[in-house]
Image: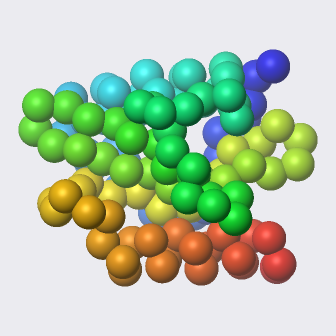
Amino acid sequence: MTYQIDYFHERVRAEILEWPVDVLADYARLVELLAEYGPSLRLPHSRAFGDGLFELRPRGRTGIGRAFYCYLVGKRVLVLHAFIKKTQQTPDSDLKLARRRLKEVQHG
């Protein structure tokens, strides 16, 4: 049951690749788990935000990353938005951007 990981835009992938090495390494590990387990991946690795939006929760000594994603038909995962957390709570602007991209994917 392998899921294919895709990105909303090449910029999303490029932003992730600029993350600190330790956070990027954990992201790579979590993406492997996501590809293997898909919707069965849960906390502490993944969290549902409702309406088909999920977040991947990589972390390292230098920081915490977040990558919002959704599932598409055909065992595909689409990473919509990613960022390094600088506050305890997920910023509204990042969540709104992820939800806007999710709507775009769902409704064209």
Quarter containing the C terminus = bottom right
Q: Quadrant of residue 60?
A: top left
104 left or right, relative to 34: right
Q: Is residue 67 visible?
A: yes
What is the count of numbered marks?
0
Q: At 70% across and 58% down in the image, what residue appears?
A: 52
Q: Residue 66 versus residue 4: which sits nearer the camera?
A: 66
Q: At 16% across and 62% down in the image, what residue appears?
A: 87
Vertically, is 47 above or below 58? below
Q: From the top left corner, tell me how far across and down residue 78 is, in percent.
A: 66, 52
77 left or right, relative to 81: right
Q: From the top left corner, tell me how far across and down residue 16 is, in percent.
A: 37, 48
Q: At 47% across and 33% down in the image, what residue appears?
A: 43
Quarter containing the N terminus = top right
Q: From the top left corner, tell me how far across and down residue 101 is, in percent.
A: 61, 73
80 left or right, relative to 38: left
40 left or right, relative to 88: right
Vertically, is 28 above or below 77? above
Q: Is residue 10 visible?
A: no
Q: At 49% across and 50% down in the image, what residue appears?
A: 55
For the view shown, which residue lies furthest in the left direction?
Answer: 62
Vertically, is 107 above or below 79? below
Q: How is the image coloured?
A: rainbow
Vertically, is 92 above or below 26? below
Q: Quadrant of residue 99?
A: bottom right
